[in-house]
Amino acid sequence: MEALQEVPDPRKARGQRYPWTFLLTVVCAALASGQRTPHAIAHWITLHATELRQELAPRRNTMPSEATVRRLLRRIDLQALEKQVTTYNQQLATEAPAGTITTTKGEVLRGQAVDGKELRGLRAHGQPLSLVHLVQHGSGTVLGQTEVSEKSNEITAVPALLAGRDLSNTVLTMDALLTQRELSQHILEQRGHYLMVVKENQPALYQAIALLFEQPPWLPREKATEYQVHRTTEKGHGRRETRVLESSTTLSAYLDWPGIRQVMRRQCKRVMVKTGEVSTKMTYGITSLPASDVGVAGLEVLWRGHWTVENCTHYVLDVTMGEDGCQVHVGQAPQALSVLRKAVLALLRAQGWTNIADGLRYYGASVRRALELIGALPT
């Protein structure tokens, strides 16, 4: 709540019934208690009016109505809100050791995933909205977001997302749509590294990497210096997975791609324990990380870490926090709710909650706990 105090009040002074900070506090406390929509937020405020008055001692005995909650979300300064939440989330992410690798030189690199997400609930009102997120590996903390223009796509939105950021000691991971030369150069100019998946949308690059691993040109001595392989096997959730990641520096001098230092092939074989059903997936990739600094084991950590954005962020927002089902579509409300949900999610992760549904139930059981979580009360 200290960070959100910097978000300006868009209301005129005349006719204000509740302080701006008080309104933000009760809305955030409701979100931390598992409420998903403006109606649910307003209902939670009404149900817990007595406890809220006891804990916050507002100057009025009444509580904000649903109309007040909706006006707040529609009219809030979205740019200021995103700035404050992003800065706060970055502070939380800095304190988290998860999602990092250490180079042979002792340098700690943080993995950060770039990926897009649509707010599907808005489809019902014919107002599609997609966002591109920058998410920390491991913790799933959202470090930034930007809107994708309706007449554009994620490729043009990512430079705006990364603009002005110091990407030193970071590795940005992304899927095949964002594997673009201009974006690679953009990341390098901001002193970052990249790890990108390569598919058929880059046909020449895809074919060159596939051919290298299918028909390797190395002599025994060359292979020892230009090729690495790492194998991992895991069993759980009723399946056994074997992943083999291969990397090579052979093509670095020949490919017309900014900063490329290694190419990769990753094979994932999955066996369903009960049925014996086998599935195999082959994927290719590129990275600007030198093989002398980050070996193939570190590349595997980063590759797997990329899926934090789906498993720990997008899935939790959509399913556990109800973002997909929310059909709020007027003014700034859709994005404002999305930003505040991500702030709550980052707080829960920072408090050590790995099961976010359990965390929401825990804070939903006590108004005081929810207020302490968001910093409205001293702990």
Image (cartoon, helix red, strand yellow):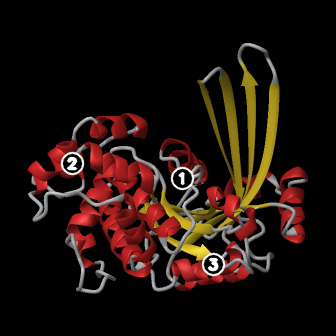
Q: Secondary structure at mark 2?
A: helix
- In screen coordinates, is 369 left or right of 357? left
Q: Is residue 147 above or below residue 344?
A: below
Q: Residue 27 placed where, x, y %? A: 32, 58
Which picture quadrant has residue 227? bottom right
Q: Is residue 257 above or below residue 230?
A: below
Label 2, label 3: how far apart the Cα atoms are: 42 Å
- In screen coordinates, is 309 left or right of 217? left
Neighbor class of circle 2 (other Cα within 10 Å; few <14, some 14-19, many 20+) is: some
**Disc with the residue nearer the chain's start (1 vs 2):** 2
Q: Secondary structure at mark 3?
A: helix
* Rendered residue at 39%/44% (across/down): 34
Looking at the image, which residue sits at the far top?
274
Residue type at mark 3: give it.
Ala
User: Is residue 241 at all visible to an observer of this figure?
Assistant: yes
**Which label belongs to residue 323?**
1
Q: Secondary structure at mark 1?
A: loop
From the viewer's side, name the closer residue of 351 and 265. Answer: 351
Residue under numbered circle 2: 49
Which picture quadrant has residue 269? top right
Label 2 or label 3, whichever lies nearer to me, is: 2
Label 1, label 2: how far apart the Cα atoms are: 25 Å
Residue under numbered circle 3: 157
Which picture quadrant has residue 366? top left
From the viewer's side, name the closer residue of 107 and 87. Answer: 87
Residue type at mark 2: give it.
Ala
**Disc with the residue nearer the chain's start (2 vs 3):** 2
* Rendered residue at 12%/56% (across/down): 56
Q: Residue 177 placed where, x, y %? A: 75, 66
